[in-house]
Image (tube, rainbow, N blue to C red):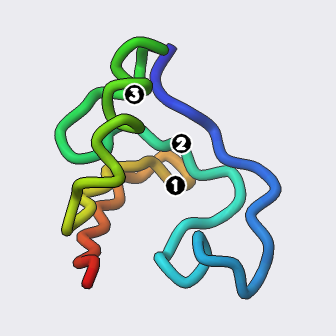
Amino acid sequence: MRGVRLFGVHAGSLLTLLGVQNGDLLQSLNGFDLASPESALQAYAQLPRTTALDVRLERHDAPVALSIRIE
């Protein structure tokens, strides 16, 4: 497993506003490698307390980094 493949991302949704597209392979979130279910759950558990998102993904076989500040 290399990450989580995202599908069903709709135009105008929060994910598209953050820069995520259908077919993106989400590989890490705030330093948590999403290649295992356990690590993905750890990343998810941290979301309510975070003030920024550091997202690493793969789009069309190219790496993409997204940094999002939450206010």
Vertical arrangement, residue 34 with respect to residue 10, above or below: above
Measured in 3D between alpha carbons, the distance from the residue under mark 1 to the one under mark 2, in whole angstroms, is: 7 Å
In the depicted view, which residue is nearer to us: 48 or 64? 48
Name the residue type under label 3. Answer: Leu
Q: Residue at x 29, y 27 (%)?
A: 33
2 vs 3, front mark: 3
| Crowdedness near tag 1: few (<14), some (14–19) or many (≥20) residues, C-alpha within 10 Å | some
In the depicted view, which residue is nearer to us: 59 or 17? 17
Relative placement, left or right, of 32 versus 2 is left
| Crowdedness near tag 2: few (<14), some (14–19) or many (≥20) residues, C-alpha within 10 Å | many
Question: Nearer the N terminus, badge 1 or badge 3?
Answer: 3
Query: What residue is shown with label 2?
Result: 25
Farthest-out residue, front: 49
* Residue 7 image offset from top left, x and y in percent: 76, 50
In the depicted view, which residue is nearer to us: 26 or 58? 26
| Crowdedness near tag 3: few (<14), some (14–19) or many (≥20) residues, C-alpha within 10 Å | many
**Local secondary structure at mark 1:** strand
Question: Nearer the N terminus, badge 2 or badge 3?
Answer: 2
State which quadrant residue 51 falls in: bottom left
Name the residue type under label 1. Answer: Arg
Name the residue type under label 2. Answer: Leu
Q: Residue at x 34, y 50 (%)?
A: 47
Query: What residue is shown with label 3?
Result: 34
Q: Are marks 1 and 2 in contact (CB under 8 Å)?
A: yes
**Local secondary structure at mark 3:** loop
Relative placement, left or right, of 40 versus 6 is left
Q: Residue at x 41, y 49 (%)?
A: 57
State which quadrant residue 44 falls in: top left
Disc on res. 59: 1
Question: Nearer the N terminus, badge 1 or badge 2?
Answer: 2
